Amino acid sequence: MAAPMTPAARPEDYEAALNAALADVPELARLLEIDPYLKPYAVDFQRRYKQFSQILKNIGENEGGIDKFSRGYESFGVHRCADGGLYCKEWAPGAEGVFLTGDFNGWNPFSYPYKKLDYGKWELYIPPKQNKSVLVPHGSKLKVVITSKSGEILYRISPWAKYVVREGDNVNYDWIHWDPEHSYEFKHSRPKKPRSLRIYESHVGISSHEGKVASYKHFTCNVLPRIKGLGYNCIQLMAIMEHAYYASFGYQITSFFAASSRYGTPEELQELVDTAHSMGIIVLLDVVHSHASKNSADGLNMFDGTDSCYFHSGPRGTHDLWDSRLFAYSSWEVLRFLLSNIRWWLEEYRFDGFRFDGVTSMLYHHHGVGQGFSGDYSEYFGLQVDEDALTYLMLANHLVHTLCPDSITIAEDVSGMPALCSPISQGGGGFDYRLAMAIPDKWIQLLKEFKDEDWNMGDIVYTLTNRRYLEKCIAYAESHDQALVGDKSLAFWLMDAEMYTNMSVLTPFTPVIDRGIQLHKMIRLITHGLGGEGYLNFMGNEFGHPEWLDFPRKGNNESYHYARRQFHLTDDDLLRYKFLNNFDRDMNRLEERYGWLAAPQAYVSEKHEGNKVIAFERAGLLFIFNFHPSKSYTDYRVGTAFCTFKIVLDSDAAEYGGHQRLDHSTDFFSEAFEHNGRPCSLLVSKVLL
């Protein structure tokens, strides 16, 4: 492993290396000013930035720039020409021969051979019929036939296929030539980048209460209005890129350019995004470029008959834990494929950005497996870092923000790599946000392992505020990960079986339901207010969805019972789910009004272990939480820098399933009495448990 640059060895060498790095990376000085502890790693940032710049320069010299380079989908695959003919192109460097077959030629495997070009590329032109109509009509089935160097005849789906379907009981997907006469016309422009990001993480297929795969149409008509009503301004769509195995949750991609056909047509997804835009909601795609399915019949694996092509050959090309293939990010054509994929979703479907899945796996040769990531900076530099993958991520962020300056990119990184969310000009990764993945783990740990009276307020505050200065985080109490079978959602950890028997308003509060409803609200609000510069909720969890997620699979007899969201529970006025739904809605609306997610990090004035009280100020608001399991307080002194207060959100209010113990007509006034490091303080009449 490479050792960090230190001034102790030879000061003159250290200074020379530091000055060279500062000269090569335009704004590295700003990064080192923000975090001086990164100075010993200045040469690492220099090397990363120079690699990024060199590849960008090479793309410019050899491809006419990244704009042209990222339009691979305009030539690769199968395309209708102006004269009615078809132009076909593939990259299959390990193939001996390439052919196109399908319905159009009676599935004759060799009647339409591709011509071999340089650099492993193959092309084919199919002239139109005599009446100038295309030989391959919209909706017909196709396959690429590969003859391998070992003599095998392989039937493959083009990596650039725009639509694939699985019919009936077929195991594998079929490639459908998608070329409708009329394409979808977008009616609404993209909304402006929101000041604060409130994300509703969504899965189209499970969005119905029925035991089936829901459609894009269903989501558009039934779920989008709910999201708007709840005050979210961003949707993160999961499992859109086509994946053969539904239970993979969309993380084993087989066709990267195809919107999943199990929910409907490409035009119906375009309509979903367009409708969201009409509501002022931006839409992010959960993009999976960290790995790919091992499927060969309907995936990228073994496309040209070799174990390489899009992936590393040998052990480096396989993720043992995920049983999937790993991209060769240094390959020219892999870069073209992945960058073109990014552009495709931005332009063809008008997505407003991306949540990049599995970034930790990409960043390190060890893929984060078995790594604790203590925070020691040496863990983020040196030979364990896959700088080819990091360079790809820098290129992807550069492309996204060049094409759509208001676009948003989020990194799913558990390692906490420094500068991942800093500008590329500083030597950073260029992401706008990273997911604060330690926060949901902390809540689950507290609920699983600790009694209420043993909750550590300092530990909670530390987890919620432990983020790098000027690198934005998306905070969340739970995502889809915590809802999956084998774990439990927060609501289930809090209330478990009583959710089936005691959620009716016609029955008295039991201690379990009362505690569960109150803590569910408090956990969400403190995460929202203190945990980051953005907030995320997984669909249904806002109202305490009563069951985990489990997709149809052999282990559950292919049941859809748990692969659904029971939104109707919030519409039943006799059930207490409505209280949690109301609180989530008003919490988001209050954030829209005051903008705490866009405000500087909160000032925490109190984290009292005995009283179990946490108090902090952010965006002109004073947040007070009492986590004590049995004590409320009267005339409780809280430090502040503000003067006059009025209750704007009260978890104890009746509409949120509370006990209505606070008088909302009361104004509170602070006095010039220093307390907990704040210049003023006020006596709060009641701080309720």
Image (tube, rainbow, N blue to C red):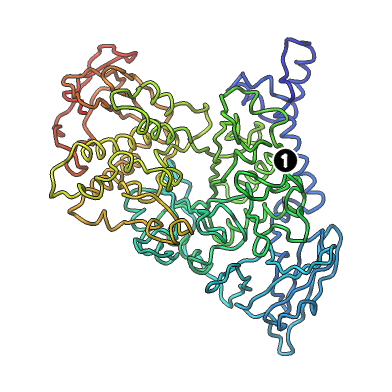
Q: Nearer the viewer, residue 431 or 66?
A: 431
Q: Is residue 85 left or right of residue 510?
A: right
What residue do we see at 34% from left, 48% from top?
A: 231
The answer to whether 547 is drawn above or below residue 266 in the figure is above
Q: Is residue 453 left or right of residue 406?
A: left
Residue 281: percent from the left, percent from the top? 42, 53
Q: Amino acid at mark 1?
A: Asp
What residue do we see at 18% from left, 50% from top?
A: 504
Give the quarter of the figure containing the N terminus: top right
Residue 195: percent from the left, percent from the top? 44, 41
The image quadrant of residue 602 is top left
| Residue holding disc 1 | 388
Q: Nearer the viewer, residue 509 or 26?
A: 509
Residue 208: percent from the left, percent from the top? 37, 61
What residue do we see at 33% from left, 46% from top?
A: 542
The answer to whether 136 is drawn above or below residue 122 in the figure is below
Circle 1 crowding by C-alpha within 10 Å: few under 14, some 14–19, many from 20: some
The image quadrant of residue 204 is bottom left
Give the quarter of the figure containing the C terminus: top left
